[in-house]
Amino acid sequence: MILEVAILEIKPGLGAEFEAAFKTASAFIASTPGYISHELQRCLETENRYILLVRWQTLEDHTIRFRRSPEYQKWRSLLHHFYEPFPTVEHYKTVFPEL
């Protein structure tokens, strides 16, 4: 399993609108082959900061299957205008405990 991690900085005053759009966009990512699960969490210390955690079967399920899909274009049009700056996305693999 691969864990995608993105820290999302949302433009001030748009948190509620972002959360509503994210709820709609969630269906697009969830329909991708290789998708396992995702969650969005809001930071308690820094207003307008969220963390997105997405679990994929393989790295390519995210970087190729999702990002090259029509669903990604829909995701992008719903969400990308909220970010300032654009988020860095990293991928992680479990070290311990071993799976």
Image (cartoon, rainbow, N blue to C red):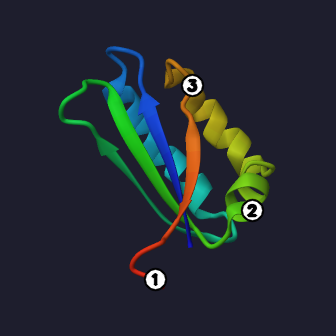
Report if the CB atoms under discs 3 and 1 are less than 8 Å apart.
Answer: no
Q: Mark 3 points at which residue?
A: 86
Looking at the image, tell me whether mark 2 or mark 3 is earlier in sequence order. Answer: 2
Residue at x-position 70% and y-position 46%: 72
Q: Name the residue under label 1.
A: 98
Q: In this view, does 34 lie to the left or right of 50?
A: right
Q: Is mark 1 on a helix, strand or loop?
A: loop
The x and y percentages for residue 67 are: 74, 48
Q: In this view, does 14 lie to the left or right of 57?
A: left
Callout 1 amino acid: Glu
Observer-nearest of 36 and 7: 7
Observer-side mark, 1 or 2, equals: 1
Please identify the residue farthest to the front as the structure is shown.
Answer: 95
Looking at the image, tell me whether mark 1 or mark 2 is earlier in sequence order. Answer: 2
Callout 2 amino acid: Glu
Residue at x-position 36% and y-position 37%: 50
Alpha-carbon span between mark 3 and mark 1? 33 Å
Quarter-of-image position of residue 2: bottom right
For label 3, count other residues whose C-alpha is less than 10 Å away and answer few (under 14), some (14-19) or many (20+).
some
Q: Is mark 2 on a helix, strand or loop?
A: helix
